[in-house]
Image (tube, grey):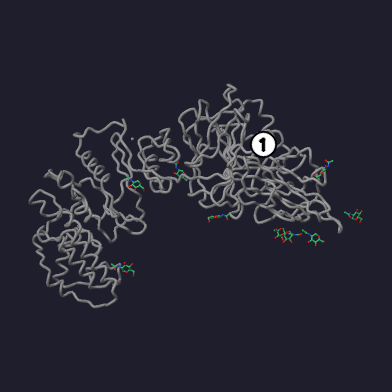
Amino acid sequence: MESHPHEVLFVALIATFAIFHIAQAQDQEGFISLDCGLSPNEVSPYIEPITGLRFSSDAGFIQSGQIARVDKSLEATSLKSYMTLRYFPDGLRNCYNLSVNQGTTYLMRATALYGNYDGLKAFPKFDLYIGPNFWVTIDMQKYGDGQAEEIIHIPRSNSLDVCLVKTDTSTPIISLLEFRPLDNDTYITGLGSLKNFMRFYLSKSESIVAFPEDIKDRIWEPYFESEWTQISTTLKANNSDDGYFVPRNVLMTAAIPANASAPLSFTGELDSPNDELYLYLHFSEVQALRANESREFDILWSGDVVYEALRPEYLNITIIHSPPLTCEGGKCNLQLKRTKNSTLPPLLNAIEVYTVLKFPQLETNKNDVVAIKDIKATYELNRITWQGDPCVPRKFLWDGLDCNSTDTLTLPRITSLQREKAVKLLSPSSTQGYKEFKAEVELLLRVHHINLVNLVGYCDERDHLALIYEYMSNKDLKHHLSGLEYLHTGCRPSMVHRDVKSTNILLDEQFTAKIADFGLSRSFQLGDESHVSTVIAPGYLDPEYYRTGRLAEMSDVYSFGIVLLEIITNQRVIDQAREQSHITEWMAFMLNRGDITRIMDPNLHGDYNSRSVWRALELAMMCANPSSEKRPSMSQVVIELKECLRSENKTEGVDSYSSFEQSMSFDTKAVPSAR
Ligand SMILES: *[C@@H]1O[C@H](CO)[C@@H](O)[C@H](O)[C@H]1NC(C)=O
Ligand SMILES: *[C@@H]1O[C@H](CO)[C@@H](O)[C@H](O)[C@H]1NC(C)=O
Ligand SMILES: *[C@@H]1O[C@H](CO)[C@@H](O)[C@H](O)[C@H]1NC(C)=O
Ligand SMILES: *[C@@H]1O[C@H](CO)[C@@H](O)[C@H](O)[C@H]1NC(C)=O
Ligand SMILES: *[C@@H]1O[C@H](CO)[C@@H](O)[C@H](O)[C@H]1NC(C)=O
Ligand SMILES: *[C@@H]1O[C@H](CO)[C@@H](O)[C@H](O)[C@H]1NC(C)=O
Ligand SMILES: *[C@@H]1O[C@H](CO)[C@@H](O)[C@H](O)[C@H]1NC(C)=O
Ligand SMILES: *[C@@H]1O[C@H](CO)[C@@H](O)[C@H](O)[C@H]1NC(C)=O
Ligand SMILES: *[C@@H]1O[C@H](CO)[C@@H](O)[C@H](O)[C@H]1NC(C)=O
C-alpha cells in the first residue's frame, strides 16, 4: 500500500513480460481480448507472441473514435497488443458494447498506454464507466504514461457497455479491453463490485506473473520491503483451492519479518478514507518443518485479531478472505503476529486488496433499449451521443430522447423520441399519411393500457415515417382483449380505433394481446372528418360506413366481431375460394345448414367447452351485425367474454346451443360483399 499499485504495474508490464514462455496452450474460453485501434490491414484475431493470448480488433464493438500507434521507441520493449490505441476526439461519452453472460463473474481490465501517440507529450485524463455507473478515473497526469484498471463485476444483462468519458480538454484513449470469466464461487461480495486496489506476490523477483501462468489472467506484481526476508521453495504447491487457481509460481516464495520476533506488517493509506476493503491473503508453507518446529500466527486488522492461530500447510494453499473492512481515518494496518507457541515467524505469499464499488444506477429497461437500438440500426443513426445507456446518467441522455429516470430504484424508461431541429419535417398538408402518423403518435403518447402497445418512440425522417412499439414476442393473434373497451370508455375524450383487424393485435410473451396501429384513430370530440381516406382492411369495415360514410364507436365493435369470428373458426375473413366469400356469410350459411362442428377451428381438436364457445360465437355475430343499433357496446362485449371464460373454466360438459339458435337474428342479405 506504499505506492499506487497501478503505476508500478505498468512499468513492470512493459519491462518484464518478455521472460514468459507459452508453457502450454491455456484454455481461453469466454475470454474477451480486444486490441483497441488495431489497423484494419492487420490480421484479426492474432496470437500475442509473448503471452499466447488471442486478441481481436475492437472495430466491431465501437462505432466512434480514431486509431493510432504509440511512439516507435516503445516497440522494442513492449507487447504487440500495446502498440495501437483508439482515441476519442469527438463526443463526451464513447462506449464499447460487449456481449457477455449475465450472472457470470468477470475480471474486467482496461489498459491505456499513451506512448506519445499524438506527439504532444500531453497525458490524458478521463473517466471510465461501466454501463451508467462510474468505474474509475484514468489519470496519466498523476500516474504516468500508462494505467491498467481492473474490476471484478457481474453483468446484469447479456450486453455491457464500457464507456470513456471526457472530463477535461484531453482526449480519452484506450489500448486494451480484456474480460475473463471467473469461477462464480470466487471473489464474492455482498453488494457491489470489486475494484482492484493491489495484487502483489511477495518476492524479490522483478517479473510479473500473468497469463498463462495465471489461467484467470490476473496480473501479479512482485513486491518486497526492506524489513522482510524472502524464503522460497523449488517445489510446486497444490493451488486448486475452490476455483481461485492462484498461480503456483506465486506460491513458491514468501516473506517473513527479518526480525523473527516482530510481526509482518503492511501499512497504507487510502485515497478515499471511507472505502470498504476486501482482503484475499494467500498462504502456502514453503519450508518442510521439523517435528519440533511450528509456524503459527494470528491475523490482525487495525490492531484487532480477525483470524486466530493460522498454520499454513506445506505446499498447499490456504486462502483467507476478509469481510468488508474499513480503515480508520483512511489509515490501514494489517499485521501477522506469531503466537506464543510458534517457533517460526509468520509468513505471507501473496495479497490481493479490493475496494468495494457500488453501482447504484439501474440500466434502462431492456425492451426500451432493444427498441431504440433497433431504430438506431434501421435508420443508421450514427449520432455521437447515441452510445451507452440511452437514459442514464442523465447528463449523457441521448439527443432527442426523453426518459423517466426520476429515482434509482425503478428502471429508467424511454418516454419519447422527439423530432429535432430524429430532421426535415413532412409538411403537415403534404400527405394524408402524415396526418395518420401524427394522430397515432399523439394518441399513443396519451394512452397507456396493458392491452395497448406502448409507443416507444417514433421516427419521422425524410420519407421514412415509423412508429416504434414495445417489442411483442408473439406476433400472432389469440384471445383476451380489453384494449378497445378502454379506448371507448377509459379515455377522455374516448377514441375509435377504426382499423381493428387481427394483424393489428400483437401478443407478448404471456399472450397478452395489445392493439397496435392507431393511424386511423380519432378522438370523438376531434373526429370531425367524415371520410376514411386510407384503405381499411377489406372485410373488417363496418358495412354501415358504405351507407353513412362515417365511422363510429360501433364500427370498432363490428371489426372486433370479425376478429372474434376469425379466432374461433380459423377461417379467412375473405376467401374467394369459398362460395360465401365473407366470413359472416359463411357463418350464416353453416349455421343454416346446422353444420356446427365444421365451424370450429379444427386445430382445437374439440378441446373446448361448447357452451362457452357458442356464447362467444353468438357474441361475435352480434358484434358483426350489419346494423350498428343491434351491436353490443364494447363494455358489454368485455363482460360477456369474461363470462365465457368463467364458464370455459367450469368442467361441466353440457352442450346446448338452444339459446344461441333462438337469439340468432342474422340477415345474410345485408352482409357486405368483399371489394
Ligand atoms: C450491442 O451488443 C449486443 C450483443 O452483442 C448486440 O445484440 C447489439 O446489437 C449491440 N448494440 C449496438 C448498438 O451495437
Ligand atoms: C455462473 O453463473 C451464471 C448464472 O448463474 C451461469 O450462466 C454461468 O454459466 C456460471 N459460470 C460458471 C463459470 O460457472
Ligand atoms: C489440493 O487442494 C484441494 C483444495 O484445497 C484439495 O481438495 C485437494 O485434495 C488437494 N490435493 C492434494 C493432492 O493435496
Ligand atoms: C525485534 O522485534 C521485537 C518485537 O517487536 C522488538 O522488541 C526488538 O527490539 C526487535 N529487534 C530488533 C533488533 O529490532
Ligand atoms: C529442533 O531440533 C533440532 C535438532 O533436531 C535442533 O537443532 C533445533 O534447535 C530444534 N529447534 C527448536 C526450536 O527447538
Ligand atoms: C491440502 O488442503 C486441503 C484442504 O485443506 C486438504 O483437504 C488436503 O488434504 C491438503 N493436502 C495436503 C497434501 O496436505
Ligand atoms: C499452545 O501449546 C499448548 C501446549 O502444547 C497447548 O495446550 C495450547 O493449546 C497451544 N495454544 C494454541 C493457541 O495452540
Ligand atoms: C415516471 O416514473 C414514476 C415512478 O415510477 C411514475 O410514478 C410516473 O408516473 C412516471 N412518469 C411517466 C411520465 O411515465
Ligand atoms: C380460469 O382458471 C384459471 C386457472 O384455473 C384462473 O387463473 C383464471 O383466472 C380463471 N378465469 C376466470 C375467468 O375465472
Q: Looking at the picture, does residue 369 appear above or below residue 649?
A: above
Q: Residue furthest top?
A: 120
User: Which image quarter: residue 654?
Assistant: bottom left
Q: Position of residue 586 (x, y in %)?
A: 17, 64
Is 629 left or right of 523, judged from the image as shown?
A: left
- Residue behind label 1 places its C-beta within 8 angstroms of ligand 2: no
Q: Position of residue 497 (x, y in %)?
A: 20, 50
Question: What residue appears at the point 50 percent right and 51 percent down from the top-left corner?
Answer: 102
Q: Name the residue carrying label 1.
A: 9
Of 423 and 282, nearer the camera is 282
Is 167 left or right of 51, judged from the image as shown?
A: left
Question: What residue appears at the point 12 percent right and 55 percent down from the top-left corner?
Answer: 543
Q: Give the quadrant of ligand 1.
A: top left
Quarter of the picture holding the N terminus: top right
Residue 217 appears in the rendering: yes
**Amino acid type shown at disc 1:** Leu
Q: Position of residue 133 (x, y in %)?
A: 49, 41
Question: What residue appears at the point 61 percent right and 29 percent down from the top-left corner?
Answer: 142
